[in-house]
Amino acid sequence: QVQLVESGGGLVQAGGSLRLSCAASGSIFSANAMGWHRQAPGKQRELVATITSGGSTKYEDSVKGRFTISRDNAKKTVFLQVNSLKPEDTAVYYCNLEQGPYGTQYWGKGTLVTVSS
């Protein structure tokens, strides 16, 4: 079984920064993709950024240049540095891990980011 635990969310003013962390434990394959999704109130969950075990990254257009995803494979941890935050970034941020031949996905419980104007 795989467990993902997020941390680092909080209340921040517009223009501020946070660093989100997600620690994975359990049966983690060496080859996988980890990422962050977010869900704002009343909206569907959306992809924010992903990173493969080889370090390839992808970002949703609205966060390019402001958010940076990184990972520490030895510690099985993925990070999301979020800068220049906007009120529209307010959401619950979920960590995601995808691995295995069938692309099995695992989710954390989320961490709330609230950006005040």
Image (cartoon, rainbow, N blue to C red):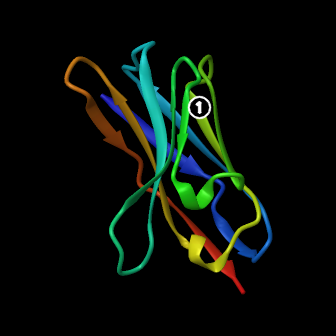
Displayed quadrant of residue 62:
bottom right
Amino acid type of the residue that numbered disc 1 sits on in the rendered structure: Thr
Is residue 76 or residue 49 the one in the foreground? 49
Displayed quadrant of residue 76:
top right
Q: Position of residue 83 (x, y in %)?
A: 75, 59
Seen in the picture, residue 43 relative to 74 is either above or below; the reply is: below
Displayed quadrant of residue 115:
bottom right
Seen at 54% across and 49% down, the residue is: 6
Seen in the picture, residue 18 relative to 32 is either above or below; the reply is: below
Q: In the orientation shown, which residue stands out farthest toward the left?
A: 102
User: In the image, 108: left or right of 18?
Assistant: left
Seen at 23% across and 17% down, the residue is: 101
User: In the image, 72: left or right of 24?
Assistant: right
Is residue 25 or residue 92 the one in the foreground? 92
Is residue 12 or residue 44 the one in the foreground? 44
In the picture of the structure, the residue carrying the numbered disc 1 is: 77
Q: Secondary structure at mark 1?
A: strand
Position of the N terminus, as image quadrant, is: top left
